[in-house]
Amino acid sequence: MKQQRNGGARRVVFAPVDSRARVDAVVRRLSDAIELGLLADGEQLPGESELAALLGVSTVTLREALMALRQQGLVITRRGRGGGSFVSLPELPADERIRARLRGWSTEELRDLGDHWAALSGAAARLATHRTEPDDLLPLRRTAEELTAADGAAPRSRVYGRFHVELAAAAQSARLTREQIALQTDVGALLCLVLGDDEYREEAADRHRAVISAVQDGADVLAGTLAERCVRESTARLVTVRLTL
């Protein structure tokens, strides 16, 4: 199994799901984590019995969910020695398909999404200043450096979204982390339209590093403001692109 990362965020991925519509809940939980890169491409999932216990579902429910994930191309299953279920990271949609998706959002809806996102990330950053230990910031630092090195809009959008999920995990809030994961599945692919710009990629990475520094310094107001500013800038760029379509 590949080396695991994103400890806090991963704990949320493998926490028990809601008791309602459990097959759908398992599919959504795992597919969101795969889309964001919280589960790495080629990573082997825990065995069926272990994974079912982690998610608080029966093995029958888990098998139905895994079947749905296989049909979506997000999981492949290998039989025999060394077999099991493995993550299969999907390709993000081509540029024109992403633009078509963005056309489905009005500018008002994008701004509303940005407000929700800014509220989540700002709250997470403020809480993280009071709840993190130095080691809790390591996933955030790694992700900030990955954004600097990422080549191409699709990898950058995944890493960008993962930073905000990990920020919520650093706040030690499972609910905030789940909210961020769900939100990033809405906005993640759209960010490909703005993160292809190398200059903005550098700007975003710098903003992420500034948030980490503020969290480490315990500057709760500054950390929240910086996180919100980062999100609002990304949202504003998406709105600008939307106006050209």
Image (tube, grey):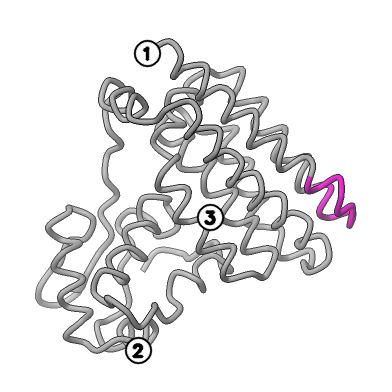
Q: Position of residue 200 (x, y in %)?
A: 60, 21
Q: Secondary structure at mark 1?
A: loop
Q: Is residue 207 magenta?
A: no
Q: Which of labels 1 and 2 is toward the front?
A: 1
Q: Which mark is residue 180?
A: 3
**Which residue bears the numbered disc 2?**
53
Q: Is residue 218 magenta?
A: yes
For the residues labelled 3 and 1, the Cα–Cα distance comes to 27 Å
Q: How crowded is the residue under tag 2: few (<14 C-alpha within 10 Å), some, or many (20+)?
A: some
Q: How crowded is the residue under tag 3: few (<14 C-alpha within 10 Å), some, or many (20+)?
A: many
Relative to 80, say whether 214 is above or below. Answer: above
The amino acid type, in three-letter code, at marker 2 is Ala
Q: First in sequence: mark 3 or mark 2?
A: 2
**Which residue bears the numbered disc 1?**
245
Q: Nearer the viewer, residue 171 or 104?
A: 104
Q: Secondary structure at mark 2?
A: helix
Q: Which of labels 3 and 1 is toward the front?
A: 1
Bounds of the magenta span?
213-224
Q: Position of residue 221 (x, y in %)?
A: 87, 49
Q: Quadrant of the C terminus?
A: top left
The picture quadrant where one finds residue 58 is bottom left
